[in-house]
Image: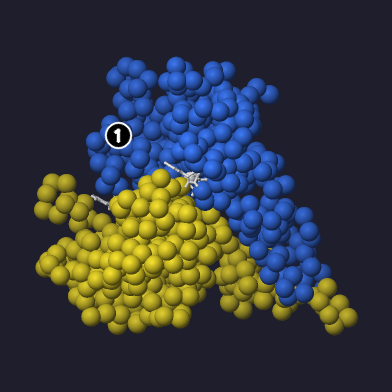
C-alpha cells in the first residue's frame, strides 16, 4: 500500500486550553501510484490531513505510511529530508512556500538542497519555469513581485523540480486562469500516468475530481465520511445534498433530465460521458444523426 | 445613471523603466449599484487595477474618481472610506489578534463608538457563519474560513463599493454560493456597488457587465451573455467555457448540431428534452 492512514487524529495546540481537534480517527489506504482526491467543506480538515503526509504536522494519534516511510506522533524532525524529497507539497497559499530572492533561486532551492550542483539546478529551474507557462524573463524577478496566479505557478515549479514520487496538491489551481488550470491539471495527470507519480489532490472543483481521480475521500468535521471511486461517491444525490456537496455539472444536467423521466444507464459524470449517452439515444432521421 | 467610479487613461508601471506597463491606458466607468466583473489571464493587471482604485499604488498617469472625489495623495483616505476590498490572499489583510478584533478594525478606523461597534461586529461574523470562531486568531483558520472572515469585515463597514479580488477562490461550491448570495443581498439592501475579479464563470455570470483585461489593456466590455456567446475565443481571453458550451462541443464531435446562441443550463435542458422526446 503506497499511502495509508490508520486511526489518525490531529489536534492543534494539543494539551493546552486552546486545543482544537481538526482530524479525528481517519483510516484509509490508497494503492501504489494512486490518484486520490480529497473533498469536503471549508474547515473539514483537508489541509490538516495532508500536511501530515510529509510530517509538516505530526499526527496526535495514529500512524501514516507513505511508501517506505512511517509517520507517527513520535516522528522527530531529525532526518525528514528523504521524506520531504519523496513527498512534494504544493500549499494552499503559494506565498507560504516562496522565500528566495529570485524566481530561479526559489525553484532551484529544493534540488540544490538535495545535492544537485548549482548550475544543473539553475538549468532545471529554467526548464520548470517554462513547464508552468512562464517565460525566462521571470527567472530574475522576485517571487513576491508577481501576480497571484504567477506565484502559484512558481510554487508548483519549485515542487516539481524536486522530482517527488508523491505529489500533494492543496487546491493547486485556485487563482489560476482556466487555461492555466487546464494545463496544470493535464501536467499532473501526465506525471501520474507516464512516471507513476502518486497524487493527492485537495479540491473544491468537482469537475476535476470526476475527470482525474481514481479514488475520492470525503471529509466532514474532521472525519472521513466516505471513501470510494468517483462513481460511488457521486452516486446518491440525496447523500451529497445532506453532506453539502455538489454534483459535477454533467451529473446535474443528467439528474434534471432524469427527474423529467429519462433513464440513464449509469449517471454521467463528465461532459463526454453525458454526450456519449445522449448521442446513443439521439433520434435518428433516415438512419443518420440529425 | 450616476457613475460611482470613473477611470481615465490609467497607466501604471511597477518599475519606472518597465517596458510593459501593468496597466496601459485603461478607461472605464462603473455605475452606482452596478455589479461589474473583471476577468482576464493571470498577470493581466486585474489586481493592479483593484489596488489602484483603493489608492494603494502611486499611479502617475491617468485619473481615478470615486464617488465624485478625485483620487490624489490628499484624498486617498476619503476614497478608501468608500471602498471595501477583499484581497486575493486574505492573509494580507488580517490585522487583528482575533477574528472579532479584525472585523472591528475597519470600524475603529472609521471612528465608530465602541457601544455601536460590538453588536455590529458580532452580527457581521454571524452573517458569514463564523460565530464559533470569533475568538480565534485569523492566521489559524482554514483557507475558506479566512475568506469568510474577510467578507465579515466588509459586512461590518458597509462601504459604497465592494471590490472582491478572487474572494471566493477557496470556498467550497456551496459556501461560494452562500457568500455571493450575501453580497447580492447587501447590494440590494445597501445599494452597494460590486466589482468582482474572478476566474469563476458562475461568479462572472452574476454580473451586469464584464470587463476583459489582457496584458494591461481593456480589450472587451459587454453583458455576460454576449461575452459567453463567443465560444472558443473565451479561452484566448482567459476565460473558461460555460458547461453548456463544453457539452455543445462534445455533442458536435458526435455529429449532433446544437443551437449556436448562448444557452443557460435551463434552456439547454429544455432543448435536450425536446430533442429527445421528438422521436
Ligand atoms: N493553526 C491552527 N490552529 C488551530 N486550529 C486550526 C489551525 N489550522 C486549522 N485549524 C482548524 O482546523 C480545522 C480544519 O482546518 P483545515 O485547514 O484542515 O480545513 P480545510 O478542510 O483545509 O478547509 P479549507 O477548504 O477552507 O481550506 C478548521 O476548523 C480550522 O479552523
Ligand atoms: N509588486 C509587484 N512588482 C512588480 N511587478 C508586479 C508586482 N505585482 C504584480 N506585478 C506584475 O504586474 C502584472 C500584473 O499583475 P496583477 O497582479 O495585476 O495581475 P492579475 O491580473 O491580478 O493576475 P492573477 O490572475 O494572476 O492574480 C504581472 O505581470 C505581474 O508580474
Ligand atoms: Mg485547506
Ligand atoms: Mg490578481
Residue B6 at x, y = what percent?
Answer: 61, 26
In this image, A111 relative to A16: left or right?
right
In this image, A173 relative to A283: left or right?
left
Q: Report the residue that reaches farthest toward the right.
A: A286
- Toward the viewer: B13 or B227? B13
The quarter of the image holding the N terminus of chain A is: bottom left
- Place residue A91 in its image quadrant: bottom left
Q: Is residue B146 visible?
A: yes
Q: How many marks?
A: 1
Q: Is residue A244 visible?
A: no
- Toward the viewer: A137 or B222? A137
* Colour chain B appears in: blue
Query: Which residue bears the numbered disc 1?
Result: B95
* Colour chain A appears in: yellow
Residue B270 at x, y = what percent?
Answer: 73, 59
Secondary-structure class at tag 1: loop
Above or below, comparing residue B128 to residue A1 in the picture? above
Q: Chain of mark 1?
A: B
Residue A211 at x, y = what percent?
Answer: 52, 71
In this image, A93 relative to B159: left or right?
left
In this image, B244 relative to A14: left or right?
right
Residue B122 at x, y = what percent?
Answer: 33, 31
What residue is shown at x 21% (from left), y 61% (from top)? A57
Neighbour class for label 1 at 10 Å: few (<14), some, many (≥20)?
some
The answer to whether the residue bearing label 1 lies less than 8 angstroms from the nearest atom of ligand 1 is no
Above or below, comparing residue B230 to residue B210 in the picture? below
Colour mode of the rendering: by chain
- Place residue B263 in its image quadrant: bottom right
What residue is shown at x 62% (from left), y 34% (from top)? B25
Amino acid at each position: 500500500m503506497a499511502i495509508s492512514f490508520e486511526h489518525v487524529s490531529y489536534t492543534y495546540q494539543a494539551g493546552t486550553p486552546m486545543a482544537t481537534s481538526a482530524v479525528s480517527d481517519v483510516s484509509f489506504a490508497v494503492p501504489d501510484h494512486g490518484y486520490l482526491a480529497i473533498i469536503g467543506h471549508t474547515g473539514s480538515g483537508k489541509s490538516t490531513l495532508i500536511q501530515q503526509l510529509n510530517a509538516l504536522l505530526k499526527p496526535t494519534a495514529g500512524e501514516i505510511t507513505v511508501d517506505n516511510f512511517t509517520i507517527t506522533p513520535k516522528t522527530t524532525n531529525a532526518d525528514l529530508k528523504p521524506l520531504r524529497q519523496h513527498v512534494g507539497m504544493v500549499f494552499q497559499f503559494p506565498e507560504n512556500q516562496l522565500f528566495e530572492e529570485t524566481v530561479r533561486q526559489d525553484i532551484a532551492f529544493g534540488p540544490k538542497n538535495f545535492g544537485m550542483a548549482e548550475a544543473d539546478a539553475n538549468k532545471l529551474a529554467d526548464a520548470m519555469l517554462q513547464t508552468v507557462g512562464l517565460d525566462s524573463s521571470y527567472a530574475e524577478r522576485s517571487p513576491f513581485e508577481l501576480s497571484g496566479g504567477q506565484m502559484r505557478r512558481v510554487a508548483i515549479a519549485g515542487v516539481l523540480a524536486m522530482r517527488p514520487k508523491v505529489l500533494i496538491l492543496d487546491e493547486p489551481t485556485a487563482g489560476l486562469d482556466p487555461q492555466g488550470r487546464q494545463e496544470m491539471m493535464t501536467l499532473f495527470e501526465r506525471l501520474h500516468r507516464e512516471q507513476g507519480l502518486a497524487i493527492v489532490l485537495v479540491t473544491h472543483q468537482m469537475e476535476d475530481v470526476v475527470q482525474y481521480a481514481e479514488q475520492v475521500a470525503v471529509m466532514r468535521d474532521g472525519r472521513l465520511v466516505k471513501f470510494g471511486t468517483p462513481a460511488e461517491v457521486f452516486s446518491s444525490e440525496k447523500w451529497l445534498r445532506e453532506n453539502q456537496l455538489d454534483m459535477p455539472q454533467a451529473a446535474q444536467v443528467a439528474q434534471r433530465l432524469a427527474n423529467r423521466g429519462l433513464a440513464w444507464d449509469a449517471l454521467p459524470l463528465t461532459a463526454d460521458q453525458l454526450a456519449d449517452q445522449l448521442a446513443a439515444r439521439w433520434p435518428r432521421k433516415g438512419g443518420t444523426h440529425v | 445613471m450616476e457613475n460611482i467610479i470613473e477611470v481615465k487613461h490609467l497607466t501604471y508601471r511597477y518599475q519606472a523603466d518597465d517596458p510593459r506597463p501593468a496597466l496601459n491606458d485603461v478607461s472605464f466607468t462603473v455605475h452606482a449599484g452596478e455589479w461589474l466583473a473583471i476577468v482576464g489571464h493571470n498577470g493581466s493587471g486585474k489586481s493592479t487595477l483593484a489596488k489602484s482604485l483603493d489608492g494603494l499604488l502611486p499611479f502617475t498617469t491617468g485619473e481615478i474618481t470615486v464617488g465624485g472625489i478625485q483620487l490624489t495623495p490628499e484624498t486617498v483616505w476619503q476614497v478608501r472610506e468608500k471602498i471595501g476590498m477583499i484581497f486575493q490572499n486574505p492573509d494580507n489583510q488580517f490585522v487583528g489578534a482575533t477574528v472579532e478584533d479584525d472585523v472591528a478594525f475597519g470600524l475603529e478606523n472609521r471612528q465608530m463608538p465602541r457601544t455601536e461597534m460590538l453588536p455590529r461586529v458580532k452580527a457581521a461574523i454571524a452573517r458569514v457563519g463564523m460565530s464559533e470562531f470569533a475568538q480565534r486568531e485569523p492566521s489559524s483558520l482554514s483557507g475558506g474560513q479566512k475568506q469568510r472572515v474577510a467578507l465579515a469585515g466588509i459586512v461590518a463597514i458597509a462601504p459604497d463599493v465592494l471590490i472582491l479580488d478572487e474572494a471566493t477562490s477557496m470556498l467550497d461550491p456551496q459556501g461560494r454560493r452562500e457568500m455571493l448570495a450575501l453580497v447580492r443581498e447587501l447590494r440590494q439592501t445597501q445599494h452597494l456597488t460590486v466589482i468582482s475579479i474572478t476566474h469563476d464563470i458562475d461568479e462572472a455570470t452574476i454580473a451586469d457587465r464584464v470587463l476583459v483585461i489582457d496584458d494591461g489593456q481593456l480589450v472587451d466590455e459587454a453583458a455576460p451573455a454576449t461575452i459567453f456567446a463567443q465560444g472558443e475565443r473565451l479561452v484566448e481571453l482567459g476565460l473558461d467555457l460555460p458547461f453548456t458550451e463544453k457539452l455543445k462541443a462534445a455533442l458536435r464531435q458526435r455529429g449532433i448540431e446544437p443551437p449556436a446562441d448562448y444557452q443557460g443550463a435551463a434552456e439547454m435542458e429544455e432543448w435536450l428534452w425536446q430533442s429527445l422526446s421528438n422521436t
